[in-house]
Amino acid sequence: DIKASIKDNLKNIAKALKKDIDELTVIILERERHNEMIKQIKEAGARIRLIEHGTISAGIAPAIPNSGIDVMMGIGGAPEGIITAVALKCMNGEIQGVLKPHTEEFKQQAIDRKLDLNKVYKTDDLAKGNYLIFAATGVSDGPLLKGVVFTEYGYLTHSLVMRSKSGTIRYIETHHHESMPSKGYKGRA
C-alpha cells in the first residue's frame, strides 16, 4: 500500500513472501530525494541495493523468480512507470504509483489531462487492455538482463519479450556479427 509507511509495507511484504524483514532486498535509485526513504528502509532492517539507473528493470525484477530483488521503492518518472506496468501486467505483477509533478508546468499538464494527483494508480490503471507486449534489451548489467557483451566477432545482446494475453515470457540471446572475415571464419554455436 503506497499510502502506508515503509516499515508497514516491508512487514507485509515479508509476511507475504514468508521471509523476515532482514531477508528482504529493496532496490532503489541512489538519489538525494531518496535519502529519507533509504534511512527508513535501513531502520526497518531490510537490505538495500542502490542503482544509478534502470528503474524499469528494477521495477520488473521483483516479479522475476530468483532476481534477488523483493521490492522496488522510490520516486521515478511517469513514462518509466507506464512501461513497467505493462511488463508487470504480462507477469501478473503489481505496481502502485501516485503522480508527484516536480514542476508547476508538469502539474498543469496533469490537471489539463484530468489526472487525479491524489489517486493511487495501479497496474490496470497504467496498463490498460489485455493485448499488451513488452520488449526490452539490456544495455548495461542489471537485475533483469545482462548488458551488451562485446566479442571477437561483434557483440551479444540479451532481450526479454512478454505478452499479456498468453503470459509468455521469452529470453532471447542475440549474436550480432559485424563484418565476418572472408577466410577462416569459424562461427560460434
Image (cartoon, rainbow, N blue to C red):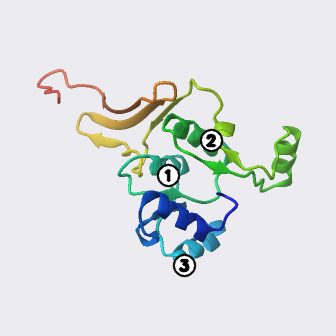
Q: Residue 28 in the image: state x and y as whole percent.
A: 54, 61
From mark 3 to mark 1, how far is it between C-alphas?
A: 22 Å
Instruction: Residue under label 1, please give it.
Output: 58
Circles 3, 2 touching at the beta carbon (< 8 Å): no
Mark earlier in primary sequence (2, 1): 1
- In the depicted structure, whether residue 6 falls above or below residue 83: below
Secondary structure found at label 3: helix
Looking at the rendered structure, the kind of residue marked 3 is Glu
Quadrant in which the C terminus is drawn: top left
Q: Residue 100 in the image: state x and y as whole percent.
A: 76, 55
Q: Residue at x 63, y 40 (%)?
A: 82
Q: Residue 141 in the image: state x and y as whole percent.
A: 39, 50
Pair 3/1: label in front: 3
Using the rendered image of the protein, determine whether residue 182 is visible from the camera's viewpoint.
Answer: yes
Q: Nearer the viewer, residue 4 or 104?
A: 4
Looking at the rendered structure, the kind of residue marked 2 is Thr
Q: What number is the disc on residue 43?
A: 3
Q: Residue at x 18, y 21 (%)?
A: 182
Q: What number is the disc on residue 123?
A: 2
- In the depicted structure, whether residue 68 falls above or below residue 80: below
Circles 3, 1 touching at the beta carbon (< 8 Å): no
Mark earlier in primary sequence (3, 2): 3
Q: Residue at x 38, y 57 (%)?
A: 68
Q: Nearer the viewer, residue 110 or 32?
A: 110
